[in-house]
Image (tube, helix red, strand yellow):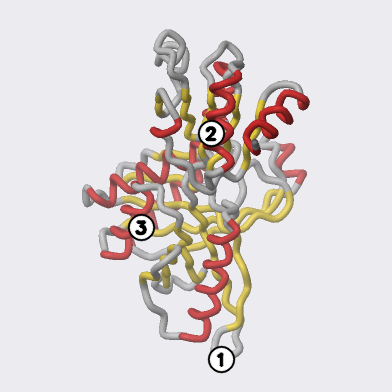
Amino acid sequence: MLSNRKVTKLLSGMINNNETGVLATVVSVQGSAYKREGAKMVIEANGDYYGMISGGCLESDVASSAEYVYRTGKSIVKKYELDEDLVWGLGLGCPGTVEILLEPIDTTSLWRRLADSYANDEAIVVCKILKNDDADAQVLLVTETEMYGSWQDEYLQENVVTIAKQKLRQQIDQSESIPLENKAGKQETVFFDVHLPPPKLCIFGAGHDAVPLAKVGTMLGYETTIVDPRPAYNTKERFPTAKSLVAGPQQVTVDSQTYIVIMNHHLERDMESLAFSLKSDAVYVGVLGPRSRSNRLLIRLKE
């Protein structure tokens, strides 16, 4: 999660700075693979690359193939079939079939809109028709409220936008390639590249047991906030990976991607935190401690 997010941030900066290069994205995986659909790497004009699309077995070859894409300005889909004999012989350890889309990075208005979405961690689905004939890529950007781009095949476009909207409502960061029929009845393969804002972890309480929870939360890709009014505990030294440290719930923004853990070990602060959390849009609220204590908190809130 973290690696891919860093790649999208790098890509966003390259687009806004008018830098050229190639974007490689895993669009299909069959069998075993270290990375799934949506994994990305960026190859710069000088051949340097960033990000991972496998366990290290494909990156150098993809970077070499990117030279053709960069030189011609044409997108390609490259297929790797790694059978077990080949995998064991090369020591790769990732048997399976992987298809990777390589496309030139440009600075058109569509790519700039994508750069803004990545920079602001906006929920967006990038929809691309996959071709193997050097055809110009057809791209749609679908957000929760808008669509950018246009395809001549309105029938296919309408179906693609419907699927993209469903993925945004589900809030599951799962990219995939889906075969769909176009207006003429011909099958097209459309890649849905789903990008969602990172989930948030809000920890009420800056005690000793909150330190490892915050660390693990950040490792798993959560933007972590620590809420505690005690300045001696709620410090950057104790929580170096936290995105923000605040004194009270009034300083916290909670949405449907926020997970809350209440662990103040203080009755009144737990009451205040729980009252705030239950009125919020948090997808999950957990209270550390015995169930009987949590039940008493809920009874007092009802009273």
Tell me where residue 114 appears, x and y as whole percent. 35, 57
Query: Which residue occupies the foreground of this view, 267 or 302?
Result: 302
Name of the residue lying farthest toward the left: 17
**Left or right: 96 in relation to 156:** right
How far is the residue under mark 3 from the one under mark 2? Answer: 26 Å
The amino acid beneath tag 1 is Ala
Which residue does the image show at 62% across and 53% down from the upper left?
98
Query: Which residue occupies the foreground of this view, 141 or 91?
Result: 141
The amino acid beneath tag 2 is Leu
Q: Which residue is mark 2?
A: 201
Tell me where residue 130 appears, x and y as whole percent. 52, 69
- Residue 108 is drawn in which quadrant? bottom left
Which residue does the image show at 54% across and 55% down from the upper left?
100
Which residue does the image show at 47% across and 47% down from the upper left?
197
Query: Which residue occupies the foreground of this view, 65 or 108?
Result: 108
How crowded is the residue under tag 3: few (<14 C-alpha within 10 Å), some, or many (20+)?
many
Q: Which residue is mark 3?
A: 114
Query: Which residue occupies the foreground of this view, 8 or 286?
Result: 286
Q: Of callouts 3 and 2, which one flags the residue occurring earlier in the amino acid sequence?
A: 3
Residue 184 tag number: 1
Q: Of callouts 2 and 1, which one flags the residue occurring earlier in the amino acid sequence?
A: 1
- Check if mark 3's residue and mark 2's residue have beta carbons within 8 Å: no
Q: Give the structural element (helix, strand or loop) at label 3.
A: helix
